[in-house]
Each structure stands twice: as C-alpha cells, then as structure tokens.
Amino acid sequence: RLNAKDNLPDDLNFGDTPLVLLTRTGDDDTRREFIAEKNDADVVSSAVFERNSLVEDRLNIKLEIVEGSDTRHGGSDINNLLAKTVSSGTAEYDLIANHMSQTTTSVLAGYLHNLNQFEYLDHDQPWWNQSYSEEVSVEGRQYLAVGELALSYTSGMYAMFYNKALWAESHGENELYDLVKNDVWTLDALITYTADYNRDLNGDGRIDKEDICGLYFQKNSIMSDAMAGAAGVRFTNVADGEYDFVLNNERTLGFVDKMKLLLFENDCVIMEPDDFPNSLKKLSEDTALFTVNMLGGTTYLREMENDYGILPLPKLNADQAGYSGFVHNGFSVFGIPATVKDGDRVTAFLEAMAAESYRRVTYAYYDTALKVQYARDPVAAEMLDIISEGIVFDFAYVYNQSLNTAAACFRNIFVDTASVGKAASTFKSLERSTERSMEQLIKKLANLKV
C-alpha cells in the first residue's frame, strides 16, 4: 500500500495556483478529512497534513479550504453554495466534497461536470471504488468520484461487532473468525448463535433494554440497510445500458424470512428506536453479544474493559460468493462544479490526493488506528480487509432520494411482524412506482449537458 504507484506524469506543475475545495466540516467525521495541523499528535491528522502538503508540493498547487456547516448526515449547505455559484456563472470552488446520496440532486440539476471528459482520473486504481463507477456511469458519464480520499468512506463501512467475553462463555474465542474464513458466516449462523441467548437481569419476566441480549438492533435505522447489503440484496440490475428495478424476487423474500426469524421469533433480540451509538454502549457494558454499526463506531469502544471483535456482516447463505456490504450513504463524494474551466487540473489534484490517501491516510486510520489501537487482536485486521474488499454499490442505493427512497424500504419493514408480513406487497408496490421513476432518472442523466 505504501509503495502503490499512480499514473500521473512526473512533470505536472500548475504554477502555484490556488485550488479551492468546498467541504463539510460540521463534525469530526467530516472535518478531519482535510483539515489538520502540523505536528498533530493524532496519527490520522498527522497523515492528513502530510498528504495535503505532499500533493501541494508535487503539483505546485495551493489548497484553499472553504468550510461548510454540514455533518456526515447532511449536505444541504454544500448543495446550496454549489447551486448559488453555478447559477451565477462564477467559479468560486474548484472541487466539492459532500454527502453521497444528497449530492445526487446536484448531479441531476446539472451543477457538476462529467468527470470522464477530463484527464488523470484512473478509476481502475485501488483508491477508487470500481463498483461505484460500474453502477452509476450512464452512457460513459460519471459525475462523482468515490473512494479512499474520503475518511468518511472508510469509517462508514458497516460491520458486525461482538463481545468476546460473552462469546467465550459459551463458544470459545476463535470460532467466529473461523466461520468467516470458511465462508459459512451466514444469517443462519447468526440466528443459531443468538437463539435463546438472553438473561433477564431485572427479573421482570421479559427481555428489554436493561437485560442481556443476543443481538441489539435499532429500529427504523441504517442497520437494516447494512443487513440487506451484506445478504447480497439487489435493487437494480444494470446490463447493456439498461437499468431495471429488481428488488421483488425470491432472494429478497428469503432474506426477509430469515430476518423475521432473527428479529421476531427466536427471543434473543432487543429492538429499540434508539440512538445509533447506544448499540455499542450495550456491547461495551457486556449486555449485548452482537450489534451492527459502522467501523467508525470503534471510537465508542476505546474504554471498553473487555475485548470486542469485528466481523463482516453475515451472508444470506453459504452459496453467496464472498462477503459484501454497503457503506453508510453519508460519506463524502467528490465533484467538479460545472463552471470550472480547467477540469484537468482538478482531476490531477483529485488523483494525487486519492493516491496519497491510499498510501498514507488510510494506512494511518485503517492499518494503525483500527487494526492495532482499537481492534485489539491481529485476526480483526484480516476481518477488516474482508469488509473493505466487499464494498458494493447499487444504482438505486446511490440515487435513493430520487427513487421513492426505495433502497431504504427495509428500515420500515423490520420494525414489527405486521410490516414484515406485508413485505411482498411492499416490494410489488415499489416495483411499479420505482420502475417509472428510474426510467425518468436515466433519461435525465443521459440528457445532461455538462
């Protein structure tokens, strides 16, 4: 990783010109992506500062950062500033970094350039996500770049966390990792290991938030998105330039059946409409065996007394080829405003920054912080590699806001048995409405002039 080579020419020199980046800085997840001080004691911040400086020197460019107020979960401030500058015909910003899902509205408005018309971006390099490029390119056009330049991309990867102390009481220490390595870490395995795993600590005759559970699951949340992505659920099929909404099928219904058994029938799960970090609070207090969260959630486990493990989320079944998963849709993507004249200069900067992030920043965050400092055991490092390599994208997941929020449907399905029972009719209804919306969306993307 440290020696990975990019294909940028050695003689690029942009004459000490400023490059203005408009980016979110409303919380630590977004601010730390580009803003860092020299000699910062934090290993990740130090790597960010070094990356910025190296790319500035390499290309003879001065990075200027304009701070937007949005957090990981928002993008309206950046979208509004982008709309204002494009509508006025000015080029205030050379590059924007913003919320993946919410930035698609700016794409559809024609506010961003087609990146493929410029030099230097090499989507086949490991610092860019090839699945994204394959899913969202319409007639050879791609408007957003996705990959390891965004720390929120890496920290937004979904994973399953488990409490090693609770696991060791019944199963020993390494069996779970062995299941993953042997390609048999499935929903059936999760159901088996959580079944009847509960303790009524407060003696009230039922399992609730005050008790020990096999799985702590947040209602109406991105945990449902995460489980669907890991099970290989597809919303869209892309073939020969055709986009079809394909959620309503036997595989999806099979996934719903297994989730129904896991969440509502084996008496092991506590489901709460809770704050996302609280799932890891349960884990750290030794009152939950399993939970789902983003890799960035490890920050909530630094003070945990007992050890925890990190796993990819389980596959639907053993026949599924490899482990897969989505990324939280609020990670930063990169686009060039339509008013920018010298797109080649910006894509050279993007490629250099992404490559240097792959070599240094990801190494600092992923290989040092997560694997060594937080994860606490060497095998977890291998699990993190599996999670990273399995990240996939789906067209409807990316353009969810413009497609009836179809890709978020499982959040409303996995709330109670009644909603699960209506899943088949929900999929049929979504199929009718989303097919029409997708056809209009593809036509709009194909007719963009930028």
Image (cartoon, rainbow, N blue to C red):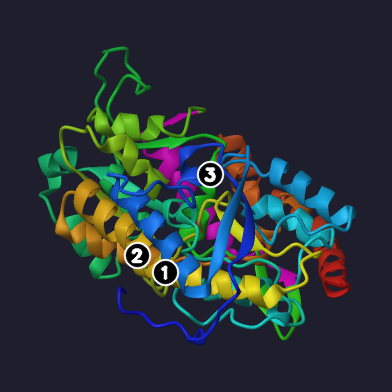
Mark 2 — residue? 360
Identify whether 281 is placed above or below 448: above
Residue 102: x percent and y percent?
Answer: 69, 50
Marks 2/1 in contact by CB < 8 Å: the verdict is yes
- What mark, if any, has residue 222 been given in the picture? 3
Residue extent of the magenta highlight = 244-272
Residue 191 in view here = no
Residue at (62%, 77%) from the top-left corner? 134
Residue at (57%, 39%) from the top-left corner? 71
Residue 252 sits inside the magenta stretch: yes
- Quarter location, residue 290: top left
Identified by mark 1, the residue type is Glu
The secondary structure type at the circle numbered 1 is helix
Residue at (69%, 80%) from the top-left corner? 118
| Quadrant including the N terminus | bottom left
| Quadrant including the C terminus | bottom right
From the viewer's perspective, is 235 left or right of 178?
right
- What mark, if any, has residue 356 been given in the picture? 1
Identified by mark 3, the residue type is Ile
Identify whether 195 is placed above or below 153: above
Select label 1 or label 3 by which is in front.
1
Residue 126 sits inside the magenta stretch: no
Residue 180: x percent and y percent?
Answer: 27, 64
Select label 3 or label 2 by which is in front.
2
Residue 350 in view here = yes
Front residue of 16/432: it is 16
Identified by mark 2, the residue type is Arg
**What is the distance, in whole Å, between disc 3 and disc 2 at their CAs?**
29 Å
Within 10 angstroms of label 2, few (less than 14), some, or many (20 or more) residues? many
